[in-house]
Amino acid sequence: MAFRKAVKGTALVGGGAIATVFGLSQFSQYRNKHGALVQVQAAEPLPVKSHLPTREQQILALQTTSEFDVIVIGGGATGCGCALDAATRGLKTALLERYDFSSGTSSRSTKLIHGGVRYLQKAIMKLDFEQYRMVKEALEERAHLLQSAPHLSAPLPIMLPIYKWWQLPYYWIGIKLYDLVAGSQCLKSSYVLTKSRALELFPMLRKDKLVGAIVYYDGQHNDARMNLAIALTAARHGAATANYAEVRHLLKTPDPVSGKPRVCGVRCRDVLTGKEFDVRAKCVINATGPFTDSVRKMDDEEVPNICQPSAGVHIVMPGYYSPDNMGLLDPATSDGRVIFFLPWEKMTIAGTTDSPTDVTSHPIPTEEDINFILSEVRHYLGADVEVRRGDVLAAWSGIRPLVTDPNSRDTQSISRNHIVTVSDSGLVTIAGGKWTTYRAMARDTIDAAVQEHNLKAGSSKTMGLKLEGAQDWSPTLYIRLVQDYGLESEVAQHLASTYGDKAFEVAKIAQVTGKRWPIVGKRLVSEFPYIEAEVVYGVKEYARTAVDMISRRTRLAFLNVQAAEEALPRIVDIMGKELNWSEQKKKEELETAKKFLYYEMGYKVKTDQLTDSSEISLMPSDIERYKKRFHMFDKDKKGFITILDVQRVLESISVQIAENTLHEILNEVDLNKNGQVELNEFLQLMSAIQKGHVSGSRLAVLMKSAEENLRRRAAIPVDRSGGGV
């Protein structure tokens, strides 16, 4: 207790000194402005469309509108934010995205809404006022985001474990300054924990040498759904928003005064139909994230690149690796990076890495990055928690669009803040920044567009504006869904936290289960609360591919790739009915989605853990035990087992599993894909399981259960394992 008081005293003095360095004299003015801004609602209710226009209607609007005020290229958080800001100012707005909304970086984040503790630390250490201002703005925007879409976001306590006594006052000062900069919009005050209390709240922590911990608060959200909510809100405010609308090139016309070419629109291609058409506008905005330079070079081939892409990999592990409502921050990894370890959607997300990369639409997580994250996680978790490679359920890579400011003298220095530039031909580019500050970035961009192109519009109206689903949402809304429609409580909570007050529209189209309970709501997969009605509703939300559905309308691909693959056939069937797909189109969608899971969501690195060249590292006694288990199925001593062998054993213990499911189970282990599992493949599987490289193998669980049943001569059901990547 005495030490704790001493720490607090030191922190107060130190914190005051640091705050003074960064202009405490401005803080009062900022705080007043900050509080007033965040609490204000839109001054006047803006007209909105009660019915969301269909994609076909949006494409028609793009083709038939003679001239828009603004065309925004890019359907990530920033681009959708720009469209919303422009539309709510009364500007005639178009939004074009060549893939799906949030298909790039915006859906592959750490899922945090934060000011950036590490940026504040750098601002302090380097006396960098620009980074300080960035943190200050981000904390203001954090408060806005949490209020504008409370169904999609919430405060999250994050623990910083301390293993050296001197670090306690050091980090406590920094975290308290973080609270101070947030001012009246501080979510909750940070606090110090004793060792015993820290272990009580985060029992998985490594105990030895633990001194205590500091807990602070940031926000967390469902990033892809938040991005989509921004796009849908823009559409309801009149913006012609279209996904799968690719910009082929920019249109230009001579300036009537100077004669110089000016950007006046774009040549657009409807990716789904192949039809091309011109879309004209007074102003074109480039908000394409990592692809910023591609659009800038459409305007001027000689312009130097400003984007310096960086890859960040994240992994998802089972929920038992972290408490339900407490995250973890590793402030200094072995190579100086920061790692977050956070509960998300009842799973655990860990990341991120930071390494240079090439710009691509399909970034792939590497085994090296996955193992780096696992290594850092092992460093902070107790010895009794075995961190297994096989417990990685999904993995993805996102590309951060870091930029150099072309207006800066030092063109090599990377700007952590966003920059807005206007080319000689009038192309407005917004680049850099972070998810949390999307609204401020959009505001600054539209301000620049209005000034450059003399557009008739007032100031931004998005501060305090509720996003899609937020207007009539309440924390108890899910109870009405249970009572009025007969949904499972878990499903109702999921719908309420995903769609907000639009959850009732999903519930209305949910199918009757035919069971006593739940009355409606057929799940896509048993262990996740996603239901079939969401696929139908997702089409109304502009989903046009199976990948859209498994990764951004639902988040199955980001939570468990095996579960996503299991749900795919039913998803494709439902979408096929809604979109009139042919059998050939359904087959193509299925294959494309499986390829997406294999390369972009970590399925490939799972199969790499078990190959026909995998080493068998088993004790002789284990080999004999597993051989006996194998031969219980291989009665004829062929040296391999087939579906028929498995079915025969299952029938003898009165267990029934569908034939197509058995095909899937054997295919996971059939390394040479010859339709049978050989003894060597089975031993490689068991060796990989022992080493922790593979977990939750359905074949291993099934064969072990069958062996135990045969011994007892009693039947028990074999259910699907959670699986791992």
Image (cartoon, rainbow, N blue to C red):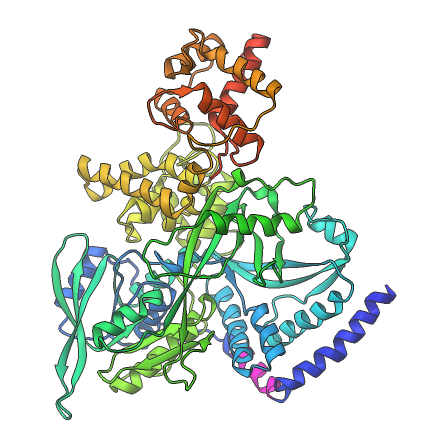
The extreme right residue here reads 2
Residue placed most toward the observer, 396 or 510: 396
Q: Is residue 707 above or below residue 3?
A: above
Range of magenta residues:
26-36
Expressed as whole percent of the image width and height from the top left, the position of residue 307 reads 36, 71
Give above or below for 524 relative to 164: above
x 60%, y 20%: residue: 620
Q: Quadrant of residue 288?
A: bottom left
Q: Quadrant of the N terminus?
A: bottom right
- Can you say whether 322 is above or below 295 in the image? above
Residue 568's spot in the image, x, y percent?
34, 37
| Residue at position x 18%, y 36% in the image | 584
Where does residue 490 sit, x and y in percent of width and height? 51, 41
Q: Main secondary structure of the magenta part?
A: helix
In this rendering, the answer to whether 654 lies above or below 548 is above
Q: Position of residue 16 (x, y in %)?
A: 71, 81
In magenta stretch: residue 29: yes
Q: Most extreme residue toward the bottom, as rendered? A: 257
